[in-house]
Amino acid sequence: MKRFVFAAVPVLALSVAQVALAQQPAHRPSAKAAGAVVQVHMQMQGSKYMFDPSTLTIHQGDVVEFVNVSGFPHDVMFDAAHIPAGAAAVLNSNMANRMGSLQGPMMTQPHQTYRVSFAGAPVGTYAFYCLPHRALGMTGTITVTAARH
């Protein structure tokens, strides 16, 4: 019986090592080097819901970090009818934890952030809004220009 137990131990150790190796995150090179990080505050001032700034210009490869400041819950949703051709697939790929197509997660805590990378995004204008507060004017635009050289 002991002989069987000793023989099983090396097999078990090998299996654990294989599992540990398989669980290591794969290195995935990004399509483009990360650019600048630009913050946009999501807030309520008085009775007005807003993105601050609501209009910004970035370069391809930049990241927009949305910061939940006040008046939440907030989210970020891009208007599929008002983004460049081919942008939906890129945004959906670059948006982690989406609730739906072109829609980031609902942020309910102060100082919570959500980042959207514009790596590989087509040049053009992107309309976005906060779904819960769109009717109250919480909208904005991001203009993406050619990548920095």
Image: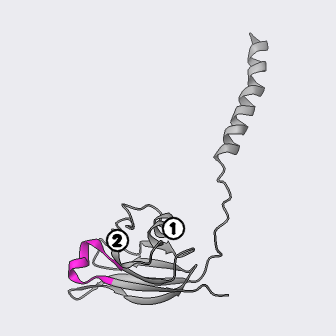
Q: Which of marks 1 and 2 is nearer the N terminus?
A: 2
Q: Does 26 appear in magenta?
A: no
Tell me what residue is drawn at x 62 percent, y 76 percent: 34
- The amino acid type, in three-letter code, at marker 1 is Asn
- The amino acid type, in three-letter code, at marker 2 is Asp
Residue 79 appears in the picture as rendered = no
Q: Which residue in the rendered view is the most extreme toward the front? A: 85
Q: Give the range drawn in magenta.
A: 128-139
Mark 1 lies on residue: 94
Q: Where is residue 74 in the image (x, y as percent from the top left)?
A: 32, 73
Q: In the shown orientation, is residue 146 left or right of residue 139?
A: right
Q: Element at badge 1?
A: helix
Q: Which labelled disc corresponds to residue 75?
A: 2
Tell me what residue is drawn at x 36 percent, y 69 percent: 109
Q: Element at badge 2?
A: loop
Q: In the shown orientation, is residue 31 left or right of residue 95?
A: right
